[in-house]
Amino acid sequence: MRKCKPKKDIRNPLEYSLDLFSGKWNSRILSVLANADNLRYGEIKSRIDNITDAVLATSLKELISSQMIVRQSFDEIPPKVKYSLSEKGRSIIPIFEMISKWGEKYYVDEDSNSDSE
């Protein structure tokens, strides 16, 4: 018997936002798509180091489901699919840029920090 996935316990807009971008892959995929108009699956995969096909496919499905990205299929042989940011997805880019600036200010490289100890 198949078990249903438990519903996420999201209680406020901050938790909703953090849930969308939790983990390392969703934010990377969104960032890659922010720097391109439309990308095919293989193009996304080639721009993200060490991501597996299974993780990329799952992450793309989640981002489509949350309406952060758009999947466009073309009626061609061989099949052609392109991914791009939705309007909702594009709206997060300025926030990513602000978070990145904050990270630049406070990021400490653990490797260089351990050398001084």
Image (spheres, rainbow, N blue to C red):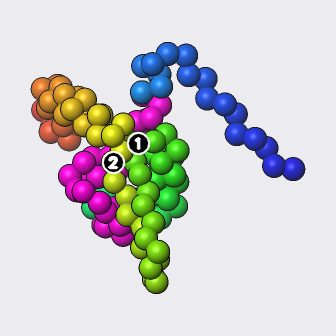
Sequence order check, earlier mark of 1 and 2: 1
Q: Is residue 3 visible?
A: yes
Tell me: residue 3, above or below residue 80.
Answer: above
Residue at image coords 29%, 34% = 91
Crowd around label 1: few <14 · some 14–19 · many ≥20 (10 Å): many
Q: Is residue 49 magenta?
A: no
Q: From the image, tell me which residue sits under label 2.
A: 85
Residues rendered magenta in the picture:
18-46
The amino acid type found where label 1 is placed reads Met
Tell me: residue 109, above or below residue 63.
Answer: above
Q: From the image, tell me which residue sits under label 1.
A: 68
Q: Quadrant of residue 45?
A: bottom left
Q: Is residue 32 magenta?
A: yes
Q: Are marks 1 and 2 in contact (CB under 8 Å)?
A: yes
The amino acid type found where label 2 is placed reads Leu
Q: Where does residue 21 sit, x and y in percent of width and height?
A: 40, 36
